[in-house]
Image: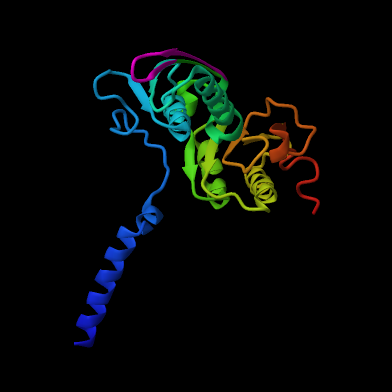
Amino acid sequence: MGGQRRRSWILWALILCLLTGCSALLEREYVVSEPHSSKFWESDAAGTLRAENYQDIVNDLLILIGQHTESATVRLYNYEDDVTVADALERATTEVQQETSMGAYAVEYITASSRAQRAYYEISLEIRYRRTAEQIQAVVNATSTEALQALLETALDEGRTELAVRIGYWGEDDQARVEEIVSRVREDRGLTDTPPWSISYYPPGGTVGLIEFALDGTAAADEVASPQDGTVAAEAAGNGAGEN
């Protein structure tokens, strides 16, 4: 009987929680990248996205960047005047390009123009890229920097000259950890006498979400990598790598 009462109490508590707004705890904002998501794509207009708020605009842009789309149309709902629309577009394009890892890594610039329709604003987007579609598709996802050594070794085994890794978690000491991993890999592979690799962190001014390695020494190598500096070269395992 005690177990039955407890189950009944839990059931009533859940019902009360849902009725009083606790269901909001279950809601999460996230980007859906499927080609025809019912949330982000218009059902009656092929290739046209939709947005109902500022976060939707940001998510739409990230979907387009992930697909290396150069031009697109977005139907923007729930906005009533040109000034508010223009402000939202300016903030969203700036945020995506400067504050998201993929936008900072892949995008050269974004332009947006709007035209009022009867029930929505039609937004025309143009995106110019600093990375190719192949480079974007080759970005590898990792939960943390612990995976970098295996990823770098695989890239070397495959003869690749670059590697981009999207990091799920970035800790306070992870930049030093990245440099240690690079030094160890270079030493293990007998590469300490070759041009140092460059390491680039994106976005440049916030929490790092993507790291790019140039494995052929094409970038200058006279600075120490820093997330705040954006794209700089790292003396990963150069002259002093084996002296510690």
39 or 129, nearer to the observer: 39
**Residue drawn 28% across and 32% down?**
38
Q: Residue furthest front?
A: 80
Q: Main secondary structure of the magenta part?
A: strand
Residue 146 horizontal/vertical position (percent): 56, 52
Q: Is residue 113 magenta?
A: yes
Tell me, yes or no, if residue 95 can be seen here: yes
Q: Residue furthest bottom?
A: 1
Colouring chosen for the image of the structure: rainbow
83 or 60, nearer to the observer: 83
Q: Is residue 6 magenta?
A: no
Whether residue 69 sits left or right of residue 110 in the image: it is left
Q: What stretch is highlighted in magenta?
A: 109-123
Q: In which quarter of the image is residue 216?
A: top right
Instruction: Work out whether 148 lies above or below 9.
Output: above
Residue 155 horizontal/vertical position (percent): 52, 37
Instruction: Work out whether 168 lies above or below 138.
Output: below
**Residue drawn 36% across and 24% down?**
49
Residue 191 horizontal/vertical position (percent): 67, 39
102 or 141, nearer to the observer: 102
Quarter of the figure with the C terminus = bottom right
Residue 197 horizontal/vertical position (percent): 68, 34
233 or 27, nearer to the observer: 27
**Residue drawn 41% across and 25% down?**
67
Q: Please state the total of marks drawn on the protein image.
A: 0
Quarter of the figure with the N terminus = bottom left
Tell me, yes or no, if residue 161 can be seen here: no
**Residue drawn 28% across and 18% down?**
46
